[in-house]
């Protein structure tokens, strides 16, 4: 399904959005930033239909052949699967960084699904949960950072399919590439899975897949919403782009994903299949629990006040 968000491919369109929707004042600095956004949008438009998984035109020339590409994915998988997480996600690159907690992983059949907008603060919440529960983080963004094309403004988009293949595998039964999801769920290892959560059927499907895992059913599946206003999230995405040159389409965050993670959370949280549900607010620097249900809610344990309950 195609995502429809406002076009930002010229200065006036971008200015209207940043000034009217996000509240930025018209300054020289804003004009400079707008030109960077417009350049990134144009690059994205020209390459969005050419993912590195199937198209050679945007591949790094050293990893241009299908064979070298497969070997690259194998290397990325092994690095992620058998190395510890770094202190900062921004330091992850080819040769550095994995998904394992420093204190070691436990195999207790506990899974934590975290949903929220891009730049909402999911990584910080995921890291804290992973460390406390000795869980691996199964996040396609970790894999993205290891592909050489990721440094481009449009890099996160063109390597999306390959990073998903490394992280969650292929729906094609003939594909024999091993994924992080397969590796860790095979032994019921504790895992944290961050997602945007704009599609409630995908969240429910992931939960049910874990509960009915053929290699060993998971005993606990927790749902955590990382909640922040879409204006704040979009501004954070812009600031991250200006700092790192890695672009997430601002219109996609503001117009398409918008309130979807929150709607998904409230639509599915009452289901008794969840071990617990909880909402973490990240508008301020310190994440805090806004509501939770379930005796063993990680939201209450790590971010909460014992007096905060379902609201």
Image (spheres, rainbow, N blue to C red):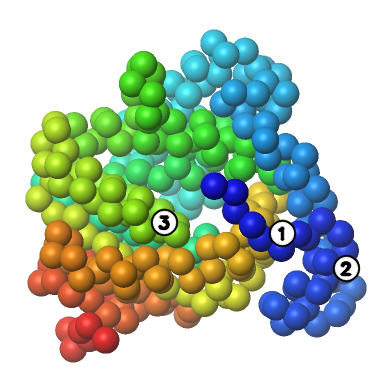
Q: In terms of image quadrants, where is residue 262?
A: bottom left
Left or right placement of residue 36 versus residue 274 in this view: right
Asked whether 47 or 186 is in front, the reply is 47
Name the residue tied to disc 2: 12
x%, y% of residue 105? 21, 43
Counting residues from the N terminus, which is met first, the one under dot 1 or under dot 3? 3
Please indicate, yes or no, whether residue 211 appears anywhere in the rendered image.
Answer: yes
State whether residue 144 is above or below residue 126: above
Residue at mark 1 to residue at mark 3: CA–CA distance: 29 Å
Q: Which residue lies at the image location 15% right of the left edge and 47% below the top edge?
A: 211
x%, y% of residue 281? 40, 77
Counting residues from the N terminus, which is met first, the one under dot 2 or under dot 1? 2
Name the residue tied to disc 3: 199
Left or right placement of residue 217 versus residue 118 in this view: left
Q: Secondary structure at mark 2?
A: helix
Asked whether 130 or 219 is in front, the reply is 219
Q: Which residue lies at the image location 39% right of the left edge and 28% below the top edge?
A: 170
Q: Which residue lies at the image location 11% right of the left edge and 36% below the top edge?
A: 216
Disc 3 to disc 2: CB gap under 8 Å: no
Counting residues from the N terminus, which is met first, the one under dot 3 or under dot 2? 2
Name the residue tied to disc 1: 242
Residue at mark 2 to residue at mark 1: CA–CA distance: 19 Å
* Dot 2 crowding, Cα within 10 Å, few <14, some 14–19, many 20+: few
């Amino acid at each position: 399904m195609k995502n429809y968000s406002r076009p930002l491919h010229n200065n006036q369109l971008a200015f209207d959005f940043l000034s009217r929707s996000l509240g930025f004042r018209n300054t020289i600095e804003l004009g400079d930033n707008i030109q960077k956004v417009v350049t990134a949008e144009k690059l994205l438009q020209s390459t969005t239909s050419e993912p590195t998984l199937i198209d050679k035109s945007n591949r790094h020339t050293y990893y241009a052949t299908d064979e070298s590409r497969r070997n690259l994915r194998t290397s990325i998988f092994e690095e992620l699967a058998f190395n510890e997480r770094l202190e900062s996600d921004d330091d992850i690159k080819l040769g550095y960084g994995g998904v394992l907690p420093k204190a070691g992983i436990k195999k207790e059949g506990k899974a934590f699904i975290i949903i929220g907008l891009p730049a909402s603060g999911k990584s910080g919440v995921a890291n804290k949960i992973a460390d406390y529960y000795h869980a691996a983080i199964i996040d396609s963004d970790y894999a993205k950072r290891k592909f050489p094309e990721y440094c481009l403004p449009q890099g996160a988009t063109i390597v999306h399919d390959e990073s998903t293949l490394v992280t969650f595998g292929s729906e094609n039964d003939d594909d024999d590439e091993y994924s992080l999801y397969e590796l860790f769920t095979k032994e019921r290892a504790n895992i944290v899975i961050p997602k945007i959560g704009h599609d409630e059927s995908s969240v429910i499907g992931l939960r049910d897949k874990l509960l009915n895992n053929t290699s060993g059913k998971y005993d606990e599946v927790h749902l955590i919403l990382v909640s922040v206003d879409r204006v704040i999230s979009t501004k954070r995405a812009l600031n991250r782009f200006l700092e790192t040159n890695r672009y997430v389409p601002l219109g996609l965050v503001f117009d398409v994903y918008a309130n979807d993670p929150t709607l998904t959370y409230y639509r599915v949280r009452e289901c008794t299949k969840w071990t617990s549900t909880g909402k973490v607010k990240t508008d301020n620097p310190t994440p805090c629990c806004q509501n939770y249900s379930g005796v063993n809610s990680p939201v209450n344990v790590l971010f909460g006040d014992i007096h905060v309950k379902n609201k």
